[in-house]
Image (cartoon, rainbow, N blue to C red):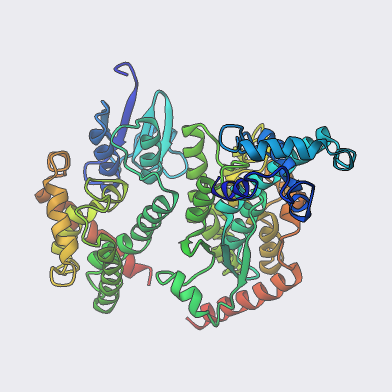
Amino acid sequence: MASEEVKLIGYWASAYRFRVEWALILKGVEYEYIEEDLFNKSPRLLELNPVHKKIPVFIHNGKVVLESLVILEYIDEIWKNNPLLPQDPYERAMIRFWAKFADEKLVLSAYLAMCSLEDEKGKAEKITEAMEALERIEGELKGKSFFGGESIGYLDLALGWISHWLPVWDEVGSMKILDPLKFPAIISWMNRFTNHKVIKNKLPPRDKMVVFFQERSKIISTTLTKNK
Amino acid sequence: MENLKFVKEQLKGKKFFGGGKIGYIDVAFDWLNLASIIEEVAGVKLIDEDNFPWLKAWMELFSDVPVIKQSWPDQEKLIIKYQFVLKLESNQTSMSSAQEEVKLFRNWSSAYALRIVWALKIKGIEFHTIFEDLENKSPSLLHYNPVHKKVPVLVHNGKPICESLVVLEYIEETWKQNPLLPEDPLDKATARFWAKFNDDKLLPSIAVVFTTQGKEQEEVKVPVMENLKFVDEQLKGKKYFGGEKIGFLDIVFGWLANMASVVEEVAGVQLIDEENFPLLKAWMELFSDTPVIKESWPDREKLIIKYQLRREGYLASSVAK
């Protein structure tokens, strides 16, 4: 076990990288973290992920696994302690469905809402989309401590960005997608998640994130306006 | 056991049920001689001497009566017969307990829904199809897929599963025969990676080519060629994406085998030619020719008409911009 090669190539501000890292720590897997500069991509990244040229890149004994949610399932299969996914096929289908839903509907809407600096109407539309998606997620918590039930699971890791990235996006975008009146269950889940002994020591610094996303939103906003 | 107790009590103090000689009831109970056959085939003890001494004694007496003895069917043959019956019964129960109620909401043309049809057929799962008119969605569809309101939706014993890739994984985990995904975790992860690539990158890039024309179409064709090259490479040294047989990834890429030529014809563009993508071309032919795939293709004429209309709509609205 100690001689196993486990490497994670990631980016300091990427929620996708943290999904994988949280999973490894929860399972007590020893790994090496390698930071990649996404704005100056290394030949190594282009070699390991020629299709997307993105992180996270997970390497296990020379084998490369890509796509954060695919990596989570791989990790769960290899290291069977502290399982992240439930056993029942229907429950597994549900968490896969919701993870996909959030990645496709919630992330993009919220991010674009943050980046819509010029376009007030577009921004309002995106905020509405994001809040509608979040409402569905709120329903999925159904009085549970975590999406995984009593302990953190696959869906908590997949949605973990909501707890730490979305508040930053709300701040940078001068918006309030995370309305505590509308989403009380999510707000209390966020507190539990970010205070979890593994998660709280593995989050990017908030102040750095605010600066980073302020810059990103300016650049993206310009691109969006140009493309109209 | 209780029922046999009732029967044995009827024999109290009697030689036969009919008294001194064989009567109506003896004849009615004659099948009890099958008891020994049932005991042997099903591996169960029913009529033992300790619990049913009179019944056991009657069975011997009855069997020995000449007119009865000469009519018995061959014991050996009976054993073989009932062994076979037992096997059939147990197969039915194990299949039907997983089968029970499997419903698939689809429409006539959806490539995503076709994935589910193929997966169910390959695994030999019986299912009911509900065809949806997507311009006029049924209350059932809206009930089972309130989030996306789309097809396909698989409903298994009343529980809905949505999103074709999620449904495929559910089918794989619920019905273990004819596995579609590789066993090795890395191979499985790789298959999932390429499935996502198809849905997130390849298919949308081809859709963009479909909605454009002229110079713009030439430009958006470039990423499609790159994407197709990646896919073509995955077939190196393999008959199917799944190896020797059709697997999960063949099902995911399967839409190429019929839709690529529809897009090419309707949008007037060449996408998958033999020179650039020999492996993909060969795979498309092999895949299309597989009976379970071939019998499920939507009508090509209808598809051409549908997509011609669609393309006209896109081009008209882009001119209006």
* Displayed quadrant of residue A179: bottom left
Q: What residue is drawn where x is 57% and y is 64%?
A: B103
**Residue B181 x %, y %:** 55, 41
> Who is closer to the viewer here, B249 or B320?
B249
* Displayed quadrant of residue A181: bottom left
Q: Is residue A121 above or below residue A54?
A: below
> Who is closer to the viewer here, A187 or B194?
A187
> Who is closer to the viewer here, B276 or B163?
B163
* Displayed quadrant of residue B32: top right
Q: Is residue A47 left or right of residue A83?
A: right
**Residue B270 x %, y %:** 69, 57
Does the image show residue B239? no
**Residue A152 x %, y %:** 24, 46
Q: What residue is drawn where x is 19% and y is 61%?
A: A186
Q: Quadrant of the C terminus of chain A?
A: bottom left
Q: What residue is drawn where x is 67% and y is 61%?
A: B259
Q: Is residue B65 left or right of residue B252?
A: right
Q: Is residue B43 above or below residue B177?
A: above
The residue furthest top is A3
